[in-house]
Amino acid sequence: MAATKGQGRAFTLFMVGLTTAMAGIAYLSSGSGKLAMIVGLAVVAVSCGLFLKLKPQEGKVAAKAQALGLQLAGVAVVLLGWLTVLYGLHLTSSVSGRMTTSIIGFAISLVGMLYLLPAAANKNAIWKG
């Protein structure tokens, strides 16, 4: 999961903190739930600090800067598909209408995830150097 011990520790701390915070949110109405959420968020903040401390030690990144416009277009298409699904659920109350808009939204999201985002990542790929 991690390349170094420091990354492994920071990632483990992040996962424990995130799990604790989510458990706290689930039981937010109780006092122990509020405490768990606060402790979990504090642990997540500490792990983020550890990640930022490790970043300068990783050295220079081998990949060049990626095409920001194509990345944003891919993310926009994925979000458009998601919004199509959400809008379709409120558009009609029939099951067939909801299924149709959900499938259309899912297809739009797949185009963004499987076509646009990989194209943005492969534009300046290391092996094309």
Image: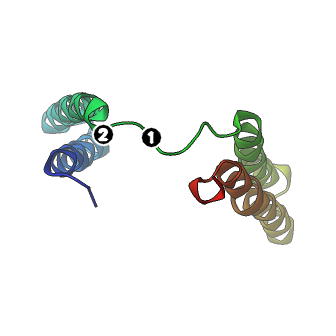
User: Who's the residue at 62% across and 53% down the image?
Assistant: 125
**Front in this rendered view, residue 47 or 32:** 47
Residue 23 appears at what percent x and percent y?
A: 25, 47
* Up-down relation of residue 15 to residue 45 (above or below): below
The quarter of the picture where residue 76 lies is top right
Dot 1 alpha-carbon crowd within 10 angstroms: few under 14, some 14 to 19, many 20 or more: few
The answer to whether 18 appears left or right of 113 in the picture is left
Name the kind of residue labelled 2 in the image.
Glu
* Up-down relation of residue 52 to residue 7 (above or below): above
The answer to whether 90 appears left or right of 48 in the picture is right
The quarter in which the N terminus is drawn is bottom left
Residue 13 appears at what percent x and percent y?
A: 17, 44
Dot 2 alpha-carbon crowd within 10 angstroms: few under 14, some 14 to 19, many 20 or more: few
Residue 26 appears at what percent x and percent y?
A: 30, 46
Q: Secondary structure at mark 1?
A: loop
Where does label 2 land, which residue? Answer: 58
User: Who's the residue at 33% across and 37% down the image?
Assistant: 59
Residue 121 badge: none
Is there CB contact under 8 Å for labels 1 and 2?
Answer: yes
Q: Secondary structure at mark 2?
A: helix
* Up-down relation of residue 97 to residue 112 (above or below): below
Where does label 1 land, which residue? Answer: 61
Residue 105 appears at what percent x and percent y?
A: 79, 58
User: Who's the residue at 27% across and 44% down the image?
Assistant: 18
The quarter of the picture where residue 29 lies is top left
Name the kind of residue labelled 1 in the image.
Val
